[in-house]
Image (tube, grey):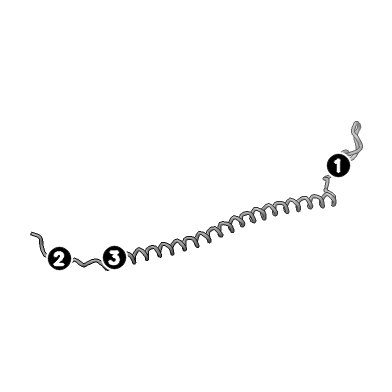
Amino acid sequence: MGKSRFAMRGQNAVSFRNESRRLGPVTNAIVLIVLICLIGLVYLTQVTKTNAYSYQIEELQTKQTSLKEEQKDLELTAARLRSIDSEAVAKASAGLVSVAPSGAIE
């Protein structure tokens, strides 16, 4: 045993040790509850954002469906108008007299 174990003149006989402080069980429980609440809050914000985007997607899909139906209606109307127009041209061309070359002009 060396002299370092015993107090010398002018020194205190009490030595202080730096002890590491540990959290108690109550503090651990409180920290865990706070962390769980924060994780739950982050989860809820993400779910809310996802729901908002799904509503927008559903609205756009509905709009797309209605536009496709409108396009089909317009295509049918265009086909109907073309057929009426071609029938009128066919009737008019049926009444025309065919022209045969009569001869050469001199």
Extreme top residue here? 10
Q: Any mark on residue 6, and which?
A: none
Q: Is residue 14 above or below residue 23?
A: above
Q: Which residue is mark 1?
A: 17
Question: Which quadrant does the C terminus fall into?
Answer: bottom left
Vertical comparison of 29 with 84: above or below: above
Q: Which mark is residue 92?
A: 3
The percent coordinates of residue 97 (x first, y second) are: 22, 67
Q: Position of residue 3 (x, y in %)?
A: 88, 38
Q: In front: 52, or 11?
A: 52
For label 3, the SS is helix
Q: Is residue 3 rendered to the left or right of residue 100? A: right
| Residue assigned mark 2 | 101
Residue found at x 64% / y 53%:
49
Judge the density around disc 3: few (<14), some (14-19), many (≥20) Cα neighbours within 10 Å.
few
Residue located at (81% from left, 50% from top): 30
